[in-house]
Image (spheres, rainbow, N blue to C red):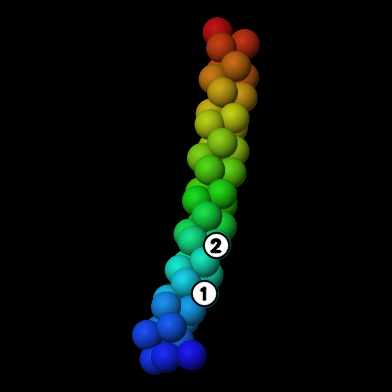
């Protein structure tokens, strides 16, 4: 194991963790946007029924 090999392993592990963190955030944002969108549609339907 050279220093370069160790650095490559560390970078690879950190990259995987970062990708995992980013994808978790992306999934949460998607769920929030989806919920807001559904709530918006529900509000529009409710509002249209009153007219």
The answer to whether any part of residue 5 appears in the image is yes
Can residue 43 be seen at all in this image of the molecule? no
Q: Earlier in the sequence, mark 1 or mark 2?
A: 1
10 Å crowding of disc 1: few (<14), some (14-19), many (20+): few
Instruction: Give SS at disc 2.
Output: helix
Per the model, the C-alpha gap separating discs 1 and 2 is 11 Å
Q: Residue at x 53, y 43 (%)?
A: 30
Residue position for label 1: 13
Residue 13 against residue 45 in the figure, above or below: below
Q: Nearer the viewer, residue 23 or 14?
A: 14
> Percent position (x, y) of residue 12?
47, 72
* Observer-nearest of 51 and 35: 35
- State the residue at coordinates (56%, 49%): 27
Q: Which residue is outermost to the top?
A: 51
Closest to the observer, 45 or 3: 3
Which image quadrant is residue 49 in?
top right
Residue beneath label 2, please?
20
Instruction: Point out the residue furthest to the front here.
Output: 1
């Amino acid at each position: 194991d050279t220093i370069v090999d160790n650095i490559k392993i560390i970078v690879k592990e950190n990259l995987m963790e970062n990708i995992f963190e980013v994808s978790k955030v992306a999934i949460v944002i998607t769920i929030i946007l989806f919920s807001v969108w559904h709530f918006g549609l529900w509000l529009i339907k409710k509002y249209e029924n009153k007219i």
